[in-house]
């Protein structure tokens, strides 16, 4: 059922519902989410290991000097990371809508639409990352606000075929709802940050016990890949639900109509 805004009355975004539904979809479809997100996360970590060394990637003291690549290698690594993140979020957007509608989860079917949209997603994700990064350097709140403005860029590209106009479309959809979106992002961010802190602690404790060898580093990388997969999953599902809610509030477009573009 769609929302019909009453004149002069602003419809609530429903931050609590978005966060709770994000967790519900994540845990009800945990295996599928991990299938979609684990492999890209693992590839991203291996790229980081190749560029920065295993110690810096895992936050473990290996006794070796930090490996810092050339500017070209760093640039290539950043591009690869954004491509992986963009592809993963694009896959998860499709999964979230199928899960919301109770449809069968088919990760293989999500690959083709995601690959077709990967270039604008990657480029715009990089731009958003730079803008939000500048905001975070100045103060945390401006960074969060900037990210809130553009947080539904990937869903807009996937659902509406917005291409390089995805940032503009996201800015239009989030207008008048950016602070509630910031609230949702903070709640989701606290959860993902908590996972990251726990994982870093576990890896820092477990790897030295197993040994600073291939087995220890391998287990550390797998643990980080699993948690990064969960982080990607929660972030992607959250973005998809925020986008769906904004389309529902502002344009009366229900989730089933959004998901129909993939049929």
Image (cartoon, helix red, strand yellow):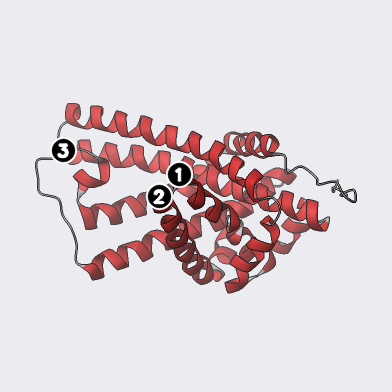
Residue 28 location (% of width, % of height): 62, 34
Task: For label 1, count other residues whose C-alpha is less than 10 Å away and answer few (under 14), some (14-19) or many (20+).
Answer: many
SS for dot 3:
loop
The residue wearing badge 2 is 41
- What is the secondary structure assignment of the residue under circle 1? helix
Looking at the image, is mark 1 or mark 2 earlier in the sequence?
2
Identified at 38% across, 59% down, the residue is: 81
Q: Which mark is residue 61?
A: 3
Residue 219: image location, x then y, percent: 28, 37
At horizontal 62% and vertical 65% (from top left) the residue drawn is 157
Q: Dot 3: few (<14), some (14–19), or many (≥20) neighbours within 10 Å?
A: some
Which residue sits at x=54%, y=56%? 146
Give the structural element (helix, strand or loop) at label 2.
helix
Q: Which residue is mark 1?
A: 229
Percent of width and height locating residue 235: 54, 46
| Residue 155 position within the rendered picture, expressed as x and y whole percent measured from the top left | 63, 58
């Amino acid at each position: 059922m769609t929302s019909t805004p009453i004149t002069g009355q602003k419809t609530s975004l429903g931050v609590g519902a978005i966060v709770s539904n994000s967790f519900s979809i994540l845990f009800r479809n945990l295996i599928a989410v991990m299938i979609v997100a684990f492999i890209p996360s693992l590839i991203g970590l291996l790229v980081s290991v190749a560029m920065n060394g295993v110690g810096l990637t895992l936050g473990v003291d290996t006794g070796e000097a930090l490996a810092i690549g050339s500017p070209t290698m760093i640039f290539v690594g950043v591009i690869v990371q954004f491509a992986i993140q963009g592809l993963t979020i694009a896959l998860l957007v499709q999964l979230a809508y199928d899960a919301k509608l109770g449809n069968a989860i088919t990760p293989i079917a999500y690959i083709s639409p995601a690959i077709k949209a990967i270039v604008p997603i990657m480029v715009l994700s990089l731009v958003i990352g730079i803008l939000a990064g500048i905001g975070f350097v100045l103060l945390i709140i401006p960074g969060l606000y900037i990210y809130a403005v553009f947080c539904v860029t990937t869903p807009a590209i996937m659902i509406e075929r917005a291409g390089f106009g995805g940032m503009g479309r996201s800015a239009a959809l989030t207008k008048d709802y950016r602070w509630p979106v910031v609230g949702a992002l903070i709640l989701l961010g606290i959860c993902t940050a908590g996972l990251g802190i726990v994982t870093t602690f576990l890896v820092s404790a477990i790897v030295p016990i197993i040994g600073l060898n291939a087995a220890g580093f391998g287990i550390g990388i797998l643990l980080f890949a699993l948690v990064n997969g969960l982080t990607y999953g929660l972030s992607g599902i959250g973005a998809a639900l925020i986008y769906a809610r904004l389309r529902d509030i502002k344009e009366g477009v229900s989730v089933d109509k959004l998901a129909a573009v993939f049929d």
